[in-house]
Image (cartoon, rainbow, N blue to C red):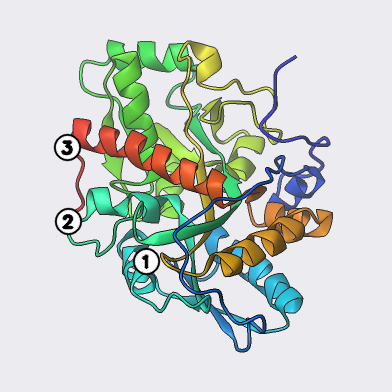
Amino acid sequence: MPRFFTAAAPLARATRRTLLALAAAPFVVGGIAHAQPAAPSPAWPTKAIKLVVPFPPGGPTDTASRIVGQQLGERLKQPVVVENRPGASGSIAAAQVAKADADGYTLVMLATPTLLAPHLYKKAGYDTTKDFAPVATVYDLPIVVVVNPTLLPQVKDLRQLIAAAKAQKTSLNYTSSGTGSFGHLSMELLKQMGQFDMQHVPYKGGVPAITDTLGGQVPVMYADLVAALPHIQAGKLRAIAVGSPQRVAMLPDVPTIAEQGFKGYDAVSWGGLLAPRGTPQPVIDRLATEVQQILADKATQDKLLNAGAIANFQNPAGMERRIQQDYAKWGQVIRDKGITTD
């Protein structure tokens, strides 16, 4: 039997609400030691906490921030005010938070594009690995390779996609939500490992990219699973591989890329809370504990799943390792492929 990315019950309807039957990813427990300034007042927090979201309202990162922020405010007995500051893959918001007072009253919801932005923007204004104190991971966002079944009727798995790409007299096109997006980087890593070629056609966002994949303008997409799921279930897109190390419960019959001959392949977008580096360790520990308890609640897990995010808590130590590993791994892909947004 295959291992799954999350536990789940059978899907009931071809909508995002079908995700509500799925269980969240397992939690991790622990902490990490940092150089500590003076301990905060035992009364912390005594005022509102600002949670900066580096993307527009309505997406998974924003929704996850509001779900967690509301409950965090209730538990801390102070408001958690969500502030959206979109732009440049989240680097505008992250740069501002990196320079904020390290007093526990300013946080940012890191997402994978923001994690990697310093590799893509020469003037991102921050170093993800040095300028922040990790608090806790919050969610994972699985991604999936899909094809238009009308344009590529013979392609039902990754091997057949690669064969089709190699057989094309001109490059087979694929799309993602944009240059430097996680879908773009994930496909470039796959191309590098599989020694085949496809031409990237970037779009400004996942919605127009999926629209044109459905319409036949582009035959292949590396997509956010939740955005693609209704079209997969309707038969308008065919899922041929998922990027996570284990299969995902939303598509239990779709094998992973690793299962299809690419051992060790792992591509999962994710998000988590950061504070400015130097934030007192007792504050970090308190926040991590509260987030862990929030994400352990089944109702919260269901709300996140309805927004397309799979709850996944990692403590500050686990989050810091994940930041370091992903920053190095995807930075190498960006350099190898000469990808830039400047």
Q: Quadrant of the N terminus?
A: top right
- Please say if 126 is above or below 323: below
Question: Of marks 2 and 1, which one's residue comes earlier in the chain?
Answer: 1
- What is the CA distance from the residue labelled 3 to the residue labelled 2? 13 Å
Answer left or right for 178 relative to 58. left
Who's the residue at 38% across and 56% down the image? 114
Q: Which residue is mark 1?
A: 94
How far is the residue under mark 3 from the one under mark 1? 24 Å
- Above or below 286: residue 33: above
Secondary structure under the numbered disc 3 in the rendered image: loop
Residue 71 at x, y percent in the picture: 72, 71
Q: Mark 3 sits on what residue?
A: 338
Question: Marks 2 and 1: CB-CB under 8 Å?
Answer: no
Q: What amino acid is at disc 2?
A: Lys
Residue type for callout 1 = Ala
Question: Dot 1, how many residues are within 10 Å of its Cα: few (below 14), some (14-19), or many (20+)?
Answer: many
- The local secondary structure at tag 2 comes to loop
Residue 252 is situated, as x and y percent measured from the top left of the image, at 70, 26
Q: Nearer the viewer, residue 318 or 144?
A: 318
Q: Is residue 240 positioned above or below 19 on the image?
A: above
Disc with the residue nearer the chain's start (3 vs 2): 2
Occupied quadrant, residue 97:
bottom left
Answer with the quarter of the image where residue 288 lies: bottom right
Q: Nearer the viewer, mark 3 or mark 1?
A: 1
Quick check: marks 3 and 2 in contact, CB under 8 Å? Answer: no
Q: Nearer the viewer, mark 3 or mark 2?
A: 2
**Residue visible at 42% across and 36% down in the picture:** 221
Rounded to the nearest angstrom, the CA distance separating label 2 from label 1 is 14 Å
